[in-house]
């Protein structure tokens, strides 16, 4: 097995071992890139599906109490201003 061989200063690595190392490195990088790109494509498709479903979904109004616009009026301060405004009535 070439993983446990110790190469001395006068020994050379055989050409087949070099080819095997290059082959396994390229195969490992190919598998890594294949799975990374596959996960990216799956995430992209899920994102597109969610975007499309949100795009064609009917707009829902918020769940608040609807007030007719004729009954609402802006706030106005009381007209009868007294001298004892500094007292807080509870």
Image (cartoon, helix red, strand yellow):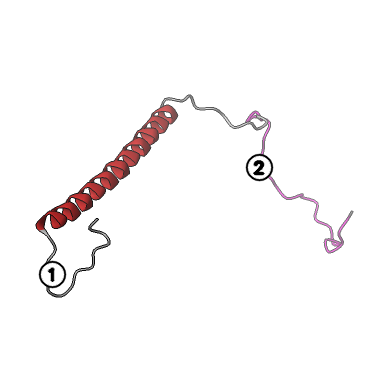
Secondary structure type for disc 1: loop
Residue 40 marker = none
Please tell me how many numbered marks the rendered image carries. 2
For image coordinates 27% across by 44% down, the residue present is: 31
Quarter occupied by residue 40: top left
Secondary structure type for disc 2: loop
| Residue 74 at x, y percent in the picture | 66, 42
Q: Is 39 situated left or right of 9 in this image?
A: right
Image quarter (top left, top right, bottom left or bottom right) of the C terminus: bottom right
Circle 1 residue: 11
**19 to 57, vertically: above or below:** below
| Residue 28 at x, y percent in the picture | 26, 49
Q: Is 51 situated left or right of 3 in this image?
A: right
Tell me which numbered mark, 1 or 2, is placed earlier along the sequence. 1
For image coordinates 12% across by 74% down, the residue present is: 10
Tell me which secondary structure the magenta stretch mostly adopts. Answer: loop
Residue 74 marker = 2
| Residue 47 at x, y percent in the picture | 39, 36
Q: Nearer the viewer, mark 1 or mark 2?
A: 1
For image coordinates 39% across by 34% down, the residue present is: 46
- Residue nearest the viewer, comparing 70 with 79: 70
| Magenta stretch, residue numbers | 67-89
Magenta stretch: includes residue 88: yes
| Residue 32 at x, y percent in the picture | 29, 47
């Amino acid at each position: 097995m070439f993983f446990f061989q110790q190469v001395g200063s006068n020994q050379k690595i055989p050409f087949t071992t070099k080819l095997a190392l290059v082959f396994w490195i390229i195969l490992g990088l190919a598998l890594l890139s294949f799975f990374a790109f596959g996960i990216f494509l799956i995430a992209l498709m899920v994102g597109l599906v969610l975007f499309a479903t949100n795009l064609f979904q009917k707009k829902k109004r918020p769940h608040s109490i609807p007030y007719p616009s004729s009954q609402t009026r802006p706030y106005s301060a009381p007209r009868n201003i007294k001298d004892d405004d500094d007292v807080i009535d509870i």
